[in-house]
Amino acid sequence: MYWLRYLLKEPFQALRTARDREFVKLLLKYGDAKRHSRTHVSFGKYQLEVPDVMSFLWQYKEIYADGFYLFKSDNPAPVILDCGANVGMSLLYFKHLYPEARITAFEAEAEIVQLLRSNLIRNKIEDIEIVPKAVWKDTDGVWFGSEEADSSSIYSKAEKKLIPSGRLKDYIEKESSIDFLKMDIEGAEIEVLDDCKNSLAHVKNLFVEFHSYIGNPQQGLADVIRVFETNGFRYFIDTNQHRMRPFVNHQYRGNEVMDLQLNIFGWRE
């Protein structure tokens, strides 16, 4: 019967929980929508405007169906720093987990910040501090390439412009305890973590989406992992990709600029 279990594994996983089943419904509802165009979407009790439906679908899958940001805290008002809040999917999730959470949300791209603010208002969430700056290692600004959806970055091939930046280390050191630090900043995580490496002792849970860009002489993953280890985190790494023929297929899901993307989950025991 092994062959039957093998054949049914993927369909079973896709329909395993109510959130998984809702993701399938969202795929059927929005999966054929035009990419990279503003679209109004809904799920559960929430209504949002998003710049790219496919990005929204995969954000739902990771955040809600797979529970990437689920964490436990004895504090009814945990402190959360959300670096790379995008259009607010993660913020809605955090506020669902902990309605009294004290959240600071960073988003670099001005157009996305507008969507983020309107989405929070639309869903009646008013007590989140939004910092419209790129998370970085200083406050001098950063050259940033704006692209569609959620792929804008300092490594973008699009025309770059200088945008305001905030030094994450300063925000971390203002807090006596941080329950959850989420970092999804499209490649800037290597420099930012290096700058913060001696300021993470009071961070309880650390999520980093790691990006490796084609053409960079060093991928930098070892440096990022070293920050987790020297700060006493236990960690789990999820590549979220099953790459065929990796010795000849060096790109991340056919991506033209990245050769690796993975998620690192760190916690303290």
Image (cartoon, helix red, strand yellow):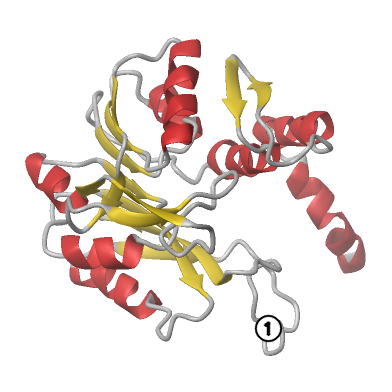
Q: Is residue 206 left or right of residue 256?
A: left
In the shown orientation, is residue 141 left or right of residue 5? left
Q: Name the image quarter holding residue 164.
A: top left
Residue 72's spot in the image, x, y percent?
A: 34, 38
Q: Secondary structure at mark 1?
A: loop
Observer-nearest of 73 and 4: 73
Compared to residue 180, the image places residue 129 above or below, namely: above
Pick the residue in front: 51 or 43: 51
Q: Residue at x 54, y 46 (%)?
A: 150
- Residue 12: x and y, percent? 80, 47
In which image quadrant can residue 250 be found?
bottom right
- Crowd around label 1: few <14 · some 14–19 · many ≥20 (10 Å): few
Q: Is residue 27 above or below residue 221?
A: above
Residue at 20% x, 42% y is 178
Name the residue that disc number 1 marks. Answer: 246
Foreground residue, 237 or 57? Answer: 57
User: Where is 58 relative to 136, above or below?
Assistant: above
Q: Is residue 71 visible?
A: yes
Establish if 48 lies above or below 219.
above
Using residue 139 as the reference point, say whether residue 105 is left or right of it.
Answer: right
Q: Residue at x 28, y 36 (%)?
A: 80
Could you tell whether 142 is left or right of 174 in the image? right
Q: Which residue is rendered at x = 11% and y = 63% of the image? A: 198
Looking at this rendering, what residue extends furthest in the bottom direction?
Answer: 247
Q: Quadrant of the N terminus?
A: bottom right
